[in-house]
Image (tube, rainbow, N blue to C red):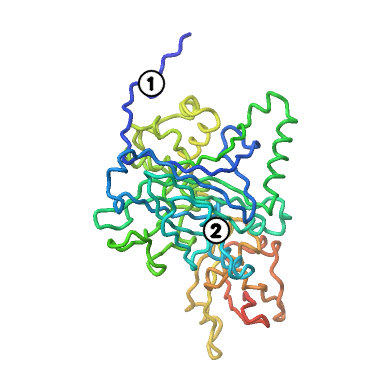
Amino acid sequence: METIPLPFLKQEDQPVPTPLCPAYQCVLCAPTSPAAKLHEETLTYLNQGQSYEIRMLSNWRAASDIPESRRLLKSVLRVGFHDRRLQYSERQQLEGWQLSHPGDRIVDIDIPLSVGVIDPLLNPSYLNIVEFLWDPSKRTSVFIQVNCISTEFTQKKNGGEKGAPFRVQVDTFKVDSQGNFNEHVYSCSCQVKVFKPKGADRKQKTDREKVEKRSALEREKYQPSCETTVFIEGMPWPEIEIPKSPSSTPGLCSPSNFKVPTPDRICASPVCASDSSTECAGESLNPSASISDTQQWLLRNRFSNYCRTFSNFTGADLLKMTRRDLTQICGVADGIRLSHALTARSVRPRLTLYISTESPSKNQDITDANQTALYQEIYMEDMTAAELTNKLADLFSVPANHILRISRTGPHGIHILLSDMMVRNMPEESCFTAMLQKVQNPDGFHCILR
């Protein structure tokens, strides 16, 4: 029986969308891992402190005809966390790293090796962000050094075997009508892991040997390793306020004008924005979404490869498609993932706690104090002591590593040290009064739950 082709499968009938801006591309000169499967994002291993070239490419042929002050582009490069849970505690993670590495930065620019980089800015307030100007009509290569390693952000219970993956993201802007670098033109990123010196080379060799030992049929499931890593296009980092440069000077902004939101206010990395429906409200596709909104949703949820396929689809069109339709268009892996993303529903947190930071006065009755105090809800997903520590640190606006221990008041006023087992056995919607007490360490606190 001959299969009748569906209208949305006929690519030749679809108008090719006209790009809104010239095409750009970033290429990291480091090989991809041979252990990445076909439908997974590439992963690249880097050595700590080693200089790696990122080539800034553009096919903007008319750039040479534009005055130099108008054709310069500004790129903001950041090294952030790939994992959503670490993104929410990024500020505390970076502060903890800074305490153990005073004077160091997460990412640096190797100025002597870089080519075509103009006015590089390394803001001391943002250890994981660098900025620079460049001319798209000329050869431009920026050499970066990542000075942290992935295992520094791994909990001890994992034994350091699985380091936290990072995202190297580049957001590029051009000059607007006011002479400021406010007009977004391109964003892209790639996933990396950073090892101690020479560790990346050993890991690359280990992955290659593991894949080679598999059968020919199994090896077909893996991507071939490439000599370079091509950044994938995505959305700009959420809620970034673009720093403004004076119109009279083609330089970068002063540090005081640069503002980046804290990770607890942002949803996720632009290319991994749909890992959990509970962590980012409003990520589900709305049936009333326009074609443009649907395209943005696909980009945010890592379906950029299918933006052209669904270029004429509204939210309602996409939501009417069955799982079978999606697997026929996108393949089994991506089709199932897209189906799950479209039908995702909010999941209740595993544990909800109510915390008050108001201590009752000496002359106030405890019952009256509980009735007048204001409580804030805390939603627990992992139900671990480490997760509760991070939540309480956010509540008190202190770095998580400054809370040295947490205890709960038990019978006869004794203090019971908080553990994972204690958190897992807390009754739903328990109410506590949390207090911070200074310890011998000048920056350390003891948190008491009553």
State left or right for residue 69 relative to residue 439: left
Residue carrying label 2: 107
Q: For the residue labelled by badge 1, is the local secondary structure a helix, a strand or a loop? A: loop
Toward the bottom, the furthest residue is 363
- Would you identify the image quadrant in which residue 69 lies? bottom left
* Residue denoted by label 1: 10
Where is 311 relative to 299, above or below? above
Who's the residue at 72% across and 81% down the image? 412
Kindly give the residue lying farthest to the left in the view shown.
177
Report x, y in % for residue 244. Answer: 33, 61
Element type at mark 2: strand
Q: In the rendered image of this protein, does residue 49 appear above or below residue 60?
A: below
In the rendered image, residue 396, in percent from the top left (x then y), is placed at 53, 73
In the rendered image, residue 77, in percent from the top left (x then y), is placed at: 47, 54
User: Residues under labels 2 and 1: Cα distance?
Assistant: 45 Å
User: What's the residue type where badge 2 is placed?
Assistant: Val
Position in image of residue 36 (x %, y %): 62, 37
The image quadrant of residue 316 is: top left
